[in-house]
Image (spheres, grey):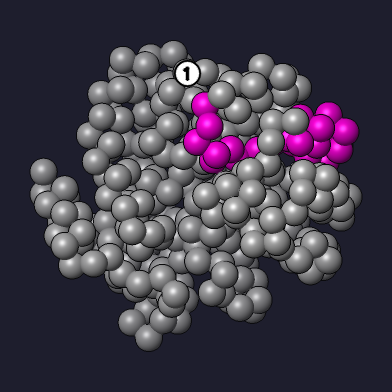
Amino acid sequence: MSLRTQLQGTGVALITPFTADLKVDFDALGKVIDAMIGGGVEYLVSLGTTGETPTLDKQEKLDILHYTFEKTAGRVPVVVGIGGNNTASLVDDLQHYPLEKATAVLSASPSYNKPSQEGIFQHYKVLAEASPKPILLYNVPGRTGRNMTAETTLRLAQEVPNIAGMKEASGDMAQCMQLLRDLPEDFLLVSGDDALGLPLIACGMMGVISVAANAFPKQFSDMVRLCLKGDFAGAKKLNDPLIDAYDLMFAENNPSGVKAFMAEQGLIKNTVRLPIVPLSAGLHAKVKAYKSK
């Protein structure tokens, strides 16, 4: 079964809940996983940047991964985030992380280094050759400082066998349209922008890897499924009330925005690790006001 079939729909970029003393809160993580699956999402993404992975040590990452596989118990596919800007270190992770139960690996383009397009291509080529699972590219120039061009993505899709899909979060509709036109038919292309999920599925993407679905799993995944069925009027009715929530979630930083929503829902404590801080009081008040609508 191709990734285009297995990972169609809504994937959730899972947050990492923390206790009051900033340890990983596995009880809360279990509740979050159950809430996501109960809400109807199609798959989970563990150890993505929404999970605050830059502030997790290696043992914490391994513990989260083992726990997530145990908790999901095969109910939904799990994609594992293994990304960074040290290619050799990532190769080591790909060879030593417990990926037997993973469906794929999501790997963000290198941040800070700002490699050339050839550097990005060679980075992913090395990762794909080392990975025991298919690689999903992740283009998020707002975080990495470097856009992966459509030309580089197409080259990777066409020339590197173990690269099977992409989370595209450039926000560049023209680039997205070029990818949708030119990518191989069996290549999985999903949106990494919650707010653009509906129009990008209308253009041909196969779903969304979502931050917002942490807080609104049923509403968001129902919206995506309606889009995939071509019922855009029905999808719009579900998406319209979420537009303000998208704005609130990303107004200051991610994941403090979505964690504020989830804390108000009683799923987690409103705790994040530095350098991320909780939402400002004024913005959190707007989150509370949204919840009470």
Q: Residue sitting at 49 percent across and 23 percent down?
A: 201
Residue 138 visible: yes
Q: Residue sitting at 81 percent across and 50 percent down?
A: 119
Q: Is residue 6 magenta?
A: no
Name the quarter where the N terminus is drawn.
top right
Residue 2 visible: no
Q: Residue sitting at 50 percent across and 62 percent down?
A: 51
Against 263, is 271 above or below?
Answer: below
Q: Which residue is mark 1?
A: 202
Q: Nearer the viewer, residue 29 or 284?
A: 284
Where residue 2 sits: x, y (%)? Answer: 72, 30
Q: Residue sitting at 48 percent across and 47 percent down?
A: 12
Against 44, is 5 above or below?
Answer: above
Where residue 54 sits: x, y (%)? Answer: 57, 70
Q: Is residue 163 magenta?
A: yes
Q: Nearer the viewer, residue 180 or 71?
A: 180
Judged left or right of residue 19, residue 260 is left
Against 13, is 268 above or below?
Answer: below
Judged left or right of residue 119, residue 231 is left
Judged left or right of residue 261, residue 49 is right
Image quadrant of residue 29?
A: bottom left
Where residue 157 sits: x, y (%)? Answer: 79, 32
Residue type beneath disc 1: Ala
Where residue 47 sits: x, y (%)? Answer: 58, 61
Residue stretch rendered in magenta on the structure:
152-173
Across the whole image, how many numbered discs are drawn on residues?
1
Name the quarter where the C terminus is drawn.
top left
Against 185, is 193 above or below?
Answer: below
Number of residues whose C-alpha sits closer than 10 Å to that of mark 1, classed few (under 14), some (14–19) or many (20 or more): some
Q: Nearer the viewer, residue 199 or 121?
A: 121
